[in-house]
Image (tube, rainbow, N blue to C red):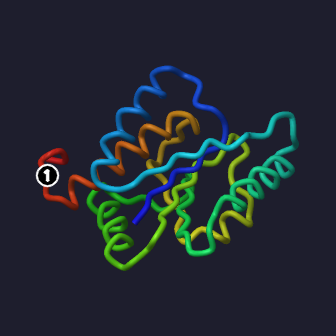
Amino acid sequence: MKLRIIWLGKTRDPWIKQGVTEYSGRIERYLPLAIDELKDEKDATLEEGRRREGERLLKQLSPNAVLVALDERGQQLDSVKFAEFIGKHRDSGTTELVFAIGGSYGFSDEVRSRAGKVLALSAMTFTHQMVRPFLLEQIYRACTILNNEPYHH
């Protein structure tokens, strides 16, 4: 199974870039990983920004890709359940599991409809920039859980 992360906007802060680099490298020891940064919208209305970013994101998906949208209103899973979710897709023949992190406008209804799952990393709200290394760390943690390695506990 291939993992793919799609996010809107460039990663700006050096400490976030460092976290992305660190955990991307760790994940690639377990699964192939691709990260795509898509152009985010500037100076659009909320609905127009969501629509444009949503169209841009959906064009990136292959028909067989399983899309997971990260959203503050999504379902929360603990790390073990998140690992089970990834393991289920890995073991059931999913060819591409795509995690999408929306931009400041959030996701359009079309993206939400296409998503096989909508997840929240926390009940707290984080910037879409900060979610990047948080998600990657949780994916790495899931890989270690699935391989019975001691990183988790």
Furthest toward the top, the residue is: 14
Callout 1: helix, strand or loop?
Answer: loop
Q: Which residue is drawn at 35% across and 70% down?
A: 90
Horizontal and vertical percent position of residue 109: 74, 64
Horizontal and vertical percent position of residue 67: 56, 65
Left or right of residue 80, residue 22 in this image:
right
Horizontal and vertical percent position of residue 25: 35, 39
Q: In the depicted view, which residue is nearer to us: 113 or 124?
A: 113
Q: Which residue is drawn at 40% across and 31% down?
A: 19
Horizontal and vertical percent position of residue 147: 18, 59
Q: In the depicted view, which residue is nearer to us: 108 or 14?
A: 14
Question: Is 2 situated above or below 72?
Answer: below
Left or right of residue 4, residue 113 in this image:
right
For disc 1, the neighbor class at 10 Å (few under 14, some 14 to 19, many from 20) is few
Q: Which residue is drawn at 35% across and 42% down?
A: 137
Furthest toward the bottom, the residue is: 92
Question: Is 113 situated above or below 38?
Answer: below
Q: Quadrant of the N terminus?
A: bottom left
Q: Name the residue under label 1.
A: 149
Badge 1 amino acid: Glu
Question: Is 127 situated above or below 99?
Answer: above
Q: Which residue is drawn at 58% across and 50% down?
A: 6
